[in-house]
Image (cartoon, rainbow, N blue to C red):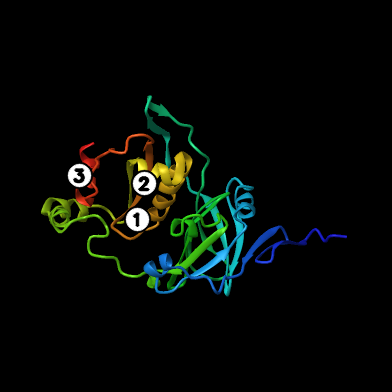
Amino acid sequence: MINSKRFLLAVSLLFTVVFAFGQPKFSADILNDFQTEELDRHFKKYDVFDLDISSLHLSVIAEDYEELVSLEIGDLDWTFVLAPNDLRGKDYVIRYNTAEGVKIGTPGPVVTYMGHQINGRSGSVRLTVTDDLLYGYIKDGEATYNIEPLRYFVNGAPVERFVIYRDEDVKPLPKDACGVSEDEMEHIYEIRDNDDFRKNEEALPMMECREVELAVAHDLSMFNKFGLSGTENHANSIMNLVQGNYDDEFFYSIEFIIVEHYVETSNPNFPTSSTNAGTVLSSFRNW
């Protein structure tokens, strides 16, 4: 007879889900011999693992508010509470441009989550979870562990395969990797150091909350890589991480509210045919 309070299901040689007192535990073994040039270019150290993401997704969406999750990846073992964190506003819309004109899409379900560790361990958690995506970070004391799909780096990688790395294991980027020239950065610094700007900032009461509405535009390359719903999920997952950097780091907390995604699905010259990073940024601003 199967014990209802402890049920062990062998999913594969590399993955096990344990249900203990109603709490699922997701375990994944590290693929010790896995190494690629693509990952070596980005990271000084990393691990690759397989995870039954569909089972994790079903567990997370089973509860409307909070879900207790245990995740074990190699020697790393975490238990944390996750709650949905919908970054989209009440009037949110997704529009996509086709050869026949702009159409309105159907917004997908909430896939972004935020939470924190329990059992006496400190650290916030921000994850995006779908049936084919696990993306985000887990803070554990002074360390931050980042998880991304391996297919983001290696074309054709299985959807259940992921890479995990710490902040300090990321190799430095080239000077122009962020797509901003020195002249553009000087302009940003001028705005930041403007006396009126600083006076307004310093006059704000501590921890006042501010809301920032934003729309996100995606060029054809994003659509080709992720598809329509995948583009929406990918952008929301990034903003879910960004939100974690603006909750208590400044004079006031900032809450980002996405009001629209605009996805180009047919025009390769949107917003420009140039490959120069500064020109692309300027073209998006002008558009």
Query: Could you give the CA–CA distance between mark 1 and mark 2, rounded to whole angstroms?
Result: 9 Å
How busy is the neighbourhood of tag 2: few (under 14 within 10 Å), some, or many (20 plus)? some
The answer to whether mark 1 and mark 2 are in CB contact below 8 A is yes
Which numbered dot is residue 256? 2
Left or right placement of residue 280 versus residue 93 in this view: left
| Element under disc 2 | strand
Left or right placement of residue 277 versus residue 187 in this view: right
Left or right placement of residue 196 versus residue 40 in this view: left
The residue identified by callout 1 is: 246
Q: Residue at x 46, y 45 (%)?
A: 233
Q: Nearer the viewer, residue 234 or 248?
A: 234
| Element under disc 3 | helix
Q: Position of residue 39 (x, y in %)?
A: 42, 66
Among numbered discs 1 and 3, the one appearing first in the sequence: 1
Which numbered dot is residue 186? none
The residue identified by callout 3 is: 282
Report which quarter residue 214 is drawn in. top left
Q: From the viewer's perspective, is residue 223 above or below residue 21? A: above
Q: Position of residue 128 (x, y in %)?
A: 50, 52
Amino acid at the residue labelled 2: Phe
Q: Position of residue 264 (x, y in %)?
A: 36, 36
How busy is the neighbourhood of tag 3: few (under 14 within 10 Å), some, or many (20 plus)? few
Among numbered discs 2 and 3, the one appearing first in the sequence: 2
Report the residue that reaches farthest toward the top.
100
Question: Can the viewer see residue 226 in this picture?
Answer: yes
Amino acid at the residue labelled 1: Tyr
